[in-house]
Image (cartoon, grey):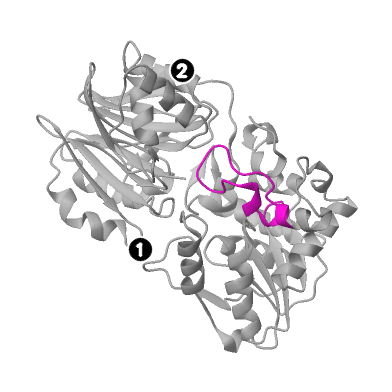
């Protein structure tokens, strides 16, 4: 998942753009970029942020980017923003999402005589593809609507033009876009937590499929939203920042409720409850409150310089982050029975090889792992995360149990079935823990506190919006 931020002000937008974009650093690990519309042209800066921090990379750049309107991105995959000179004039664009049929659309544009100047990891840059699809429209709004109708997957975007910032939310509402205001400035963000310290107040959540324009005078709706709304459940379980809220539901509170649900009916006897930092911490707090088992920190995260071990594109980088970022405290761990809460098990290799190994090496007596969501069964179709069934720990367990890959894992989705129990037991043994319990789907939905019909749960159920 990428994070996008835009601001329009009657004065300079530089500082708000710089810090507002930085507040999305937990969402992307590959590239970051800023674009500002000055008096006569768009200025742009893009940096590779793998192994570095946004603030350091852009500290000198943003001071030289003069203008009152700008957009920024922390990107999970593509180099962004892209600048396009079109029949609608010059504009810059940033996107958040994943387009499943990108190569087919690119091939179609090649046939029409289009060319692509930006290539990321050997493939067409998705942001440039979206821009090329948009300029086929009668105007920018029409182009965005036509782009929405052609893509498979998801795409929320900010488009910086001379007249303002066009903000368009994915037609399923998979990723959020939130509008804020302060004095003479308007802003739009993926994460509402970016607003508080900058002085913005939330004014509106852009609806699925809705297109708005922000300018110095305020907010103008260009295309109404759709009734369909299936926002990504993983925002509350893992990817979202604790201080953010989406659809009126705060992330930290939802995670505490997830932890309380995990504690419900769990009769494990333990000396402490802990969370795998950072996203597992709130789940553990909820579990500790509900179970009345003390919360402690046997693992602490060394934050500076290390991003999330789930998001980097390469396995080598994921392993490095997983190995280096968590530091154990042997004095707390030795001879203790520990309930460990985490947001999810994706591949399971880092959990097994680094986190659990560290606890075992420090003398943990028992390790009881509690996961805030059900087993991940299907690669995400709407954002850059897992791209292959073979990556997923649950599918690896099923393959070992069945002796082959199976197309339909439905027999393993029912928490009450013998096959589900066999799969969970296999994962627990493979990771090397005492017990393993996943959250039931209905309890996860209850903890998020939105109707299941408004949530995307594809990675657990295989059912698309």
Front of the two marks 1 and 2? 1
**Magenta span contains residue 376:** yes
Res. 224 mark: 2
**Which residue occupies 76% across, 50% down?**
440
**Which residue occupies 32% across, 52% down?**
22
Res. 11 mark: none
Give the left or right position of residue 416, taking residue 208 as reference.
right
Q: Secondary structure at mark 1?
A: loop
Q: Is residue 276 above or below residue 444?
A: below
Horizontal and vertical percent position of residue 308: 48, 60
- In front of the other: 83 or 70: 83
Q: Is residue 398 above or below residue 348?
A: above
How packed is label 1: few (under 14 Cα within 10 Å), some, or many (20 or more)?
few
Res. 51 mark: 1
Magenta-colored segment: predominant secondary structure: loop
How packed is label 2: few (under 14 Cα within 10 Å), some, or many (20 or more)?
few
> What range of the chain is rendered magenta?
372-396
**Magenta span contains residue 198:** no
Q: Secondary structure at mark 2?
A: loop
Tell me which corner region of the image, top left, top right, bottom left or bottom right, holds residue 106: top left
**Which residue occupies 43% across, 38% down?**
96
Circles 1, 2 touching at the beta carbon (< 8 Å): no
Horizontal and vertical percent position of residue 359: 63, 80
């Amino acid at each position: 998942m990428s994070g996008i931020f835009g601001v329009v002000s009657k004065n300079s937008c530089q500082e708000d753009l710089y810090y507002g974009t930085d507040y999305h650093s937990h969402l992307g690990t590959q590239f970051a970029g800023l674009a500002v519309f000055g008096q006569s042209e768009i200025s742009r800066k893009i940096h590779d942020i793998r192994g570095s921090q946004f603030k350091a990379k852009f500290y000198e750049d943003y001071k030289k980017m003069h203008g009152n309107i700008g957009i920024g991105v922390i990107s999970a995959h593509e180099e962004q923003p892209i600048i396009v000179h079109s029949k609608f004039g010059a504009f810059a664009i940033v996107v958040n999402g994943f387009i499943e049929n990108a190569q087919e659309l690119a091939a179609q544009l090649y046939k029409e005589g289009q060319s692509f100047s930006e290539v990321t990891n050997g493939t067409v840059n998705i942001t440039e593809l979206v821009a090329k699809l948009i300029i086929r429209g009668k105007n920018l709004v029409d182009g965005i609507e036509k782009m929405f109708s052609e893509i498979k997957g998801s795409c929320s975007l900010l488009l910086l033009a001379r007249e303002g910032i066009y903000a368009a939310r994915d037609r399923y509402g998979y990723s959020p876009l939130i509008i804020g205001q302060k004095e003479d400035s308007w802003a739009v963000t993926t994460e509402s937590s970016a607003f508080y310290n900058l002085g913005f107040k939330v004014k509106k959540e852009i609806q699925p499929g809705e297109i708005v324009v922000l300018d110095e005078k305020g907010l103008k709706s260009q295309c109404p939203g759709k009734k369909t709304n299936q926002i990504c459940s993983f925002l509350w379980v893992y990817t979202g920042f604790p201080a953010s809220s989406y659809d009126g539901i705060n992330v930290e509170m939802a995670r505490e409720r997830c932890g309380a649900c995990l504690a419900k009916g769990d009769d494990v006897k333990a000396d402490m409850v802990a969370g795998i930092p950072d996203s597992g911490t709130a789940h553990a707090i909820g579990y500790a409150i509900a179970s009345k088992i003390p919360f402690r920190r046997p693992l602490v995260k060394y934050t500076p310089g290390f991003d999330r071990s789930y998001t980097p594109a390469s396995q080598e980088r994921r392993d490095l982050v997983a190995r280096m970022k968590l530091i154990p405290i042997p004095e707390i761990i030795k001879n203790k029975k520990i309930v460990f809460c985490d947001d999810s098990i994706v591949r399971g290799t880092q959990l097994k090889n680094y986190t659990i190994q560290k606890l075992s090496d420090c003398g943990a007596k028992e390790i009881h792992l509690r996961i805030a969501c059900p087993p991940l069964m299907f690669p995400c179709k709407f954002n850059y995360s897992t791209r292959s069934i073979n990556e997923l720990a649950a599918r690896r367990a099923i393959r070992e149990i069945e002796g082959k890959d199976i197309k339909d894992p439905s027999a393993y989705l029912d928490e009450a079935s013998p096959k589900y129990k066999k799969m969970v037991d296999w994962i627990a043994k493979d990771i090397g823990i005492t017990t393993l319990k996943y959250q039931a789907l209905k309890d996860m939905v209850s903890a998020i506190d939105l109707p299941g019909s408004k949530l995307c749960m594809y990675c657990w159920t295989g059912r698309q919006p």
